[in-house]
Amino acid sequence: MENKKARIAVLVSGGGTNLQAIIDAEKSGILHSGTVALVISNVRSAYALQRAADAGIPGMWISKKAEGGQEGFERKLASVLEEQQIDLIVLAGFLAILSPAFTARYDHRILNIHPSLIPSFCGEGFYGLKVHEAALAKGVKVTGATVHFVNEIPDGGEIIFQKAVEILDGDTPEILQRRVMEQAEWKLLPAAAEKISAQIVAARS
Ligand code: GRF
């Protein structure tokens, strides 16, 4: 029997360039052991939802407020993931907190992309441009991106892939963010989605 692909849910909060990289990787065949079955945003206006719609992928917004807070949000999220038979969760620019109870339920089934070489510039409060501002302030000559499993420690899970990116004279946080996205994030996340999807499919047979 042809092994069914792993069903992937991508969780987003913003522009969705990492989601787009995964969508493009599925189109080009780089991602072939898994398929993006659902995109979930905690932000109603996230452009990532438009990218899902443009790609014909079901998308939805889950409002923490409407669900009555963190617990309700995670209950709704878990029920949607269950209903959609999701095998792998990919956090792509997802900025909401997931509780230890939630991450324990999906042990080694949640991936995250962080825009630095963990353990540098990571953990509480390090997200988005703040990560690149800290790298520039420290004066490091090399930064990069890390894909890791998500556990109860912010950016603390087992590292899957890393890729180094050079910092150049005159870099602003915005210029550096773009280079890290182009040269590292958009390559590592699809590759990690494929690697873990293939492991999930192989474990079934
Ligand atoms: C970016 O800072 C990226 O480094 C991080 O999340 C932010 C938004 O990414 N992973 P995206 O464009 O929404 O994928």
Image (spheres, rainbow, N blue to C red):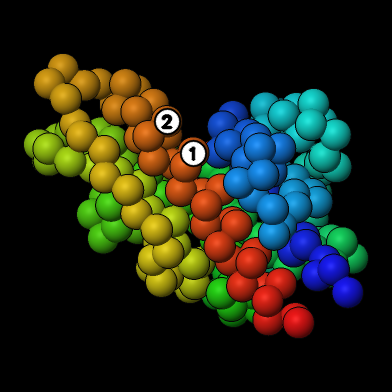
Q: Using the image as rendered, state which of residue 6 and residue 115 is in the foreground.
A: 6
The image position of residue 129, as x and y in percent, is 36, 33
Q: Indicate which disc residue 182 carries.
A: 2
- Please tell me which residue is depicted at 73% across the width and 68% down the height of the picture: 87
Residue at x 85% of width, y 34% of height: 56
- Amino acid type at mark 1: Trp
> Residue 3, which numbered label?
none
Dot 2: what SS?
helix
Look at the image and tell me whether residue 168 can be seen. Answer: yes
Badge 1 local density, few (<14 within 10 Å), some, or many (20+)?
Answer: many
Residue 137 sits in which quadrant? top left
Quarter of the view holding residue 167? top left
Vertical arrangement, residue 176 with respect to residue 4, above or below: above
Residue placed furthest toward the top: 170
Q: Quadrant of the N terminus?
A: bottom right
Instruction: Say whether residue 116 is visible.
Output: no
The circle on residue 186 is: 1
